[in-house]
Image (tube, rainbow, N blue to C red):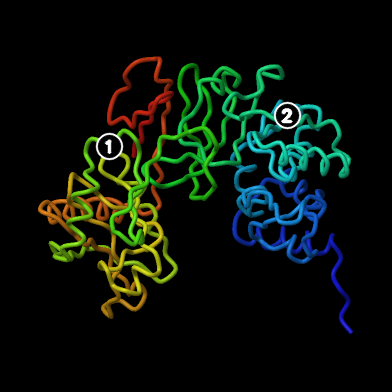
Amino acid sequence: MSQTPTAGQLRNRLVDAILGERAVPSDVERALRTVPRDAFLPGIELENAYTDQAVTIKDNPGKPLPLSCASVPSVVAMMLDQLGTRPGDKVLEVGAGTGYNAALLAELVGGGNVTTVDIDSDVALHARTTLNAAGHESVTVIERNGLLGVHENAPYDRIIATVGVWDIPATWWEQLVDGGRLVLPLRWRGQTRSVALTRHGNKLVSNSMELCGFVPIIGQNGERTASLNAADTIRLHYDQDQDQNIDTAALADTLLAEKPAGSFLSAQRIGGEESFDGVWLRATAGDDRVCRLEVTPEAVEQALIHRPAAPGRSPVLVEDGSLAYLTVTREGVDPDRPFRLGAAAYGPRGEELAHDLIAHIDAWGAARLAVPQMTVTPSATGTAPGHVINKPESRITLTY
């Protein structure tokens, strides 16, 4: 009869699986093997606590803590790798969650050097309770709007956000030492990337960038969502600075007319497991028309529009009442790369937008693994050179 694995065995099995997918620094690996994730997930079956997935937990019946409170362990490992902590570093975590990430940080830098903050009183209390129970009483837990940071414990060598951030607050700049690092799931043009940024005076310069997904932080309202049909099964997500170039009423009329401008193919083919998210990233480096198209399963089933590459989240170029979005078409030409990327177009300028999207696809295809360097400056410092994504508190440039 097989024995039920212990928490330690399950924890090591999970870490081994993560290491099989990506390299992790030895100190992060040690922390992951040391901190018991199950201690921070009350009410969750032991085996479920050690799967590589987000988990919903319930402290009070009928009142679940937010899903982001128990992030995917492989993403936790990835972001700790990006953070690059050293023993003795002072660290601020924005988004206390279950307290698990703060416990990992305590293992890495020492508990007295870790401050974690959350706007939700229940979440903060849960984190405090679980950290105490796990022997990390020296971690500071504060209930506060994370966008304000925690000035009384500043400055910090490292700041990490575990919620999606649309704009980088000036308070975080003020609380991060020169040469310090900020890691955050940054949202722009409908996508989210975990970006590691090092401060060099009045600039933040990226060290790495990884695809991820997090719920947005409370208090930032720069993202817009517009329904493009009466059933609310086709939606457009875009940033506030794109308002003037998007006519959502005209887009709805365009899609209602059911007269697509056409479907166009690029020269780029992909394999079945090959990611094409880099197309989206590449396009945002110089094109302010990039948004996110969301098509629900109901809309796909009813074939209301040509199927997007990823119905829930596909890049789309939008201008006034026209749009063109990414598509994937199966072909039998190349058995190793049987799918071909292209664009579906709607509206009077749809074909033009489709050709522009294909240009982005081909630019990605020429260097599929290329990652841009991101430079961020505070909006108060004035204009930045090159193509700039403007936000209220920061300006972003991407350079390939």
Between residues 342 and 208, which one lies in front from this camera angle?
A: 342
Q: Position of residue 50 (x, y in %)?
A: 74, 61
- Provide the residue designation for mark 1: 243
| Percent x, y of residue 199 | 52, 24
Say what secondary structure mark 2 lies in.
Answer: strand
Checking the image for residue 7, the label placed there is none
The residue that appears at 60% across and 60% down in the rendered structure is 21
261 relative to 238, above or below = below
Quadrant, the N terminus: bottom right
| Displayed quadrant of residue 334 | bottom left
Which amino acid type is marked by label 1? Answer: Asp
Q: Residue at x 37, y 42 (%)?
A: 224
List the residue tagged with mark 2: 142
Q: How far, Cα to Cα, is label 2 from label 1?
A: 36 Å
Decide if residue 186 is on the left or right side of residue 333: right
Nearer the observer, 44 or 199: 44
Q: Secondary structure at mark 1?
A: helix
Q: Quadrant of residue 178?
A: top right
Q: How packed is label 1: few (under 14 Cα within 10 Å), some, or many (20 or more)?
A: few
Work out whether 162 lies above or below 60: above
Instruction: Looking at the image, tell me whether mark 2 or mark 1 is earlier in sequence order.
Output: 2
Circle 2: is it few (<14), some (14-19), or many (20+) Cα within 10 Å?
A: many
Where residue 386 appears, as percent x and y from the top left, is 28, 28
Q: Amino acid at mark 2?
A: Ile
